[in-house]
Amino acid sequence: MSSDSSSLQSTAVINEAVQSLREGRLVAFPTETVYGLGADAKNPEAIKKVFLAKGRPADHPLIIHVAAPDKFDQAQVGWVPVLSPWVRDISEDALKLMNAFWPGPLTLVFRKDKSVPLEATGGQETVAIRAPAHPLTQELLRKFKGGIVGPSANRFGKVSPTSAADVRSEFEGMLDLMVLDGGDCQVGIESTIVDLSSSDHPTLLRPGIITPGEILEKTGIKIFLPGEIIPAEGGVDIPRVSGSLRAHYAPTTPLRLYAPGRVLDALSEFPDIKSRVAVAVWDSDSALGEDGHPSVHFEEVLVPSDSVGFAGKLYRTLRDLDQQGWDLILLPEPPPGEEWDGVRDRLQRACFGSGPSSSNHANS
Ligand code: TXA
Ligand code: MG
């Protein structure tokens, strides 16, 4: 996102987007994480268009994006009036989390208000809400005066878009889509998702740039990892977080991770590869330092060696490399530490779903 992004868009463009949403059409919007494919969260027919455009199964719930409280509106001084049209109850923990991290890259899952269409929640009685920080989208939300459902604006299973051009190329020739251009996304990976709906314990459903450690430090709230608590009895086996499926965020070029200094090991899985291997290398390391391989041409690409910088470039790098016609892409394994969990999660799924058949088995 560029700092003057909202000034790049004239009021007229935002008004046109508001009008489109009101008429049940889709509008792609920028956020600090990735671009979203937006529709009016109270319009079931519009929501169905989102699932159709993405090729996403109807039981995968969407996030509803809401406007931050308007400082100039006396009736809207806190998060409670923003949330109350959507959720059944707002706990003390929820208030602390919103005050600490909203607007920003944190999504919270609540028990839903009965007025929220089941089309938006994939048939579930819970609802995911987030107030994105991007100024352009905040302006859109304030003018729209409603919630906007917004999955990442990519085809199901593919790499999430971090620029307006990425969104256009995802839906080229398929969909006449209005795309609000807010520049490049800065966070670069999707929001952290915390479930506040199901038990006394807030649970991490998707790692992101906001880590459990940061949440504990800023709010005193301990976030449990999914394995740490026993799931409720009789729980139905439906995908609650689509990114939790094994194949996701996948390029069509085969992608693998390599352990420090083990590029050739990663290559041994692909005996037929003759040339054209792109190898990403930490920018803190001067060079690959490999002994080389008689018949393979390696091309080095530098990637940031800090977790925030790497996340910011991850999808951009995957998309760019995917379009350059490499036979194989190798990325360095992220180091240990929870600040890398969001990146590690995306990379593992991207590897699993990658390759020419990714459109067949990728599933989110
Ligand atoms: O950063 C983001 O969160 C981006 C931007 C556009 O806001 N959006 C995004 O949406 O990543 P999507 O649909 O690609 O991923 C949303 C995730 C899905 O994996 C979905 O399963 C989960 O949120 N989710 C939505 N509602 C849920 C619910 N009620 N319970 C559990 N998970 C839910
Ligand atoms: Mg997505």
Image (cartoon, grey):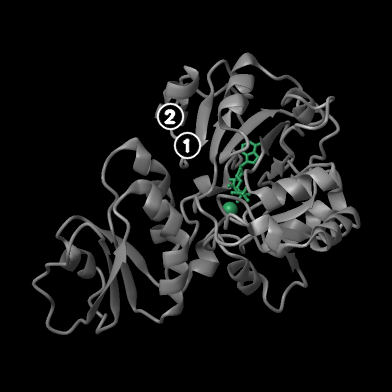
The N terminus is located in which quarter?
bottom right
Say whether residue 17 is left or right of residue 248: right
Picture coordinates of residue 105, whole percent (x, y):
56, 41
Measured Cα–Cα span from mark 2 to mark 1 = 6 Å
Say whether residue 333 is left or right of residue 290: right
Q: Is residue 15 above or below residue 71?
A: below
Please identify the quarter of the rendering in which residue 73 is found.
Answer: top right
What amino acid is at disc 2?
Answer: Glu
Crowd rating for badge 1 (residues with CA inside 10 Å; few <14, some 14–19, many 20+): some
Q: Are marks 2 and 1 in contact (CB under 8 Å)?
A: yes
Q: Which residue is mark 1?
A: 210
Picture coordinates of residue 168, whole percent (x, y):
65, 71
Picture coordinates of residue 134, whole percent (x, y):
63, 48
In the depicted view, which residue is nearer to us: 299 or 141? 141
What amino acid is at disc 1?
Answer: Ile
Q: Is residue 70 above or below residue 250?
A: above
Q: Is residue 108 above or below residue 134?
A: above
- The local secondary structure at tag 2 comes to helix
Q: Which residue is mark 2?
A: 214
In the depicted view, which residue is nearer to us: 64 or 345? 64
Picture coordinates of residue 276, whole percent (x, y):
29, 82
User: Ligand 1: does it lie within 8 Å of the C-beta at label 1?
Assistant: no
Residue occupying the point 45% across, 72% down: 320
Residue 171 shows up from this direction: yes
In the depicted view, which residue is nearer to us: 176 or 250? 176
